[in-house]
């Protein structure tokens, strides 16, 4: 299961320093449809590429948006020169199938 999308990077206001991209509703619906063993916080393991950077992480359900959020660590933001509010081109592969 793979997705490509563009979405803005945003900072979590409840705790500074954490940045996320929210997955499109269609991608979130497809991810939710697949039965899988429960993991901490409802997370789903993924492999992500932004620009020339690829890493493994997890997406987490977001009760506020009803979607999933993808954390984007500082090393990626620095390497790809992205900051709060920038549109991010994301390629995401779900590893938990």
Image: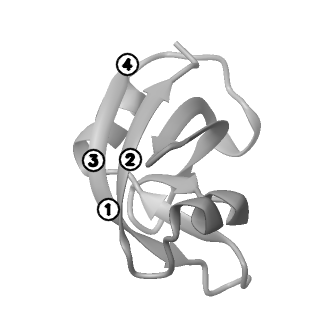
Report if the CB atoms under discs 2 and 1 are less than 8 Å apart: yes
User: Label 1: which residue?
Assistant: 7
Q: SS of the residue at dot 3? A: strand
The earlier-in-sequence mark between 3 and 2 is 3
Q: How far apart are marks 3 and 4 (CA)?
A: 13 Å
The earlier-in-sequence mark between 2 and 1 is 1
The earlier-in-sequence mark between 4 and 1 is 4
Report if the CB atoms under discs 3 and 2 are less than 8 Å apart: yes
Assess disc 2: are there few (<14), some (14-19) or many (≥20) residues with their C-alpha within 10 Å of its C-alpha: some
Assess disc 1: are there few (<14), some (14-19) or many (≥20) residues with their C-alpha within 10 Å of its C-alpha: some
Q: How far apart are marks 4 and 1 (CA)?
A: 19 Å
Assess disc 4: are there few (<14), some (14-19) or many (≥20) residues with their C-alpha within 10 Å of its C-alpha: few
Q: Which mark is residue 5?
A: 3
Q: SS of the residue at dot 1? A: strand
Q: How many marks?
A: 4
Percent coordinates x, y for residue 23 in the rendering? 37, 51
**Where 30 sits versus 96, above or below?**
below
Q: Between 87 and 2, which is closer to the camera in this rendering?
A: 87
Which residue shows up at 57% across the image and 31% down it?
46
The earlier-in-sequence mark between 2 and 4 is 4
Which residue shows up at 39% across the image and 64% down it?
65
Q: Which callout, 2 or 4, points to the residue nearer the camera?
A: 2
Which residue shows up at 29% across the image and 38% down it?
4
Report if the CB atoms under discs 2 and 4 are less than 8 Å apart: no
Give the quarter of the image for residue 86. bottom left
Give the quarter of the image for residue 57. top right
Q: How far apart are marks 1 and 3 (CA)?
A: 7 Å
User: Label 4: which residue?
Assistant: 1
Report if the CB atoms under discs 4 and 1 are less than 8 Å apart: no
Q: Residue 90 carries which label?
A: 2
Say if residue 76 shows up in the picture: yes
């Amino acid at each position: 299961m793979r997705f490509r999308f563009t979405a803005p990077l945003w900072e979590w206001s409840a705790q500074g320093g954490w940045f996320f991209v929210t997955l499109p509703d269609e991608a979130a619906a497809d991810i939710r449809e697949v039965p899988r063993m429960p993991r901490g916080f409802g997370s789903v393991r993924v492999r992500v590429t932004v620009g020339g950077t690829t890493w493994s992480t997890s997406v987490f359900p977001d009760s506020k948006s009803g979607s999933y959020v993808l954390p984007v660590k500082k090393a990626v933001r620095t390497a790809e020169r992205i900051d709060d509010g920038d549109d991010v081109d994301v390629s995401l592969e779900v590893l938990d199938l």
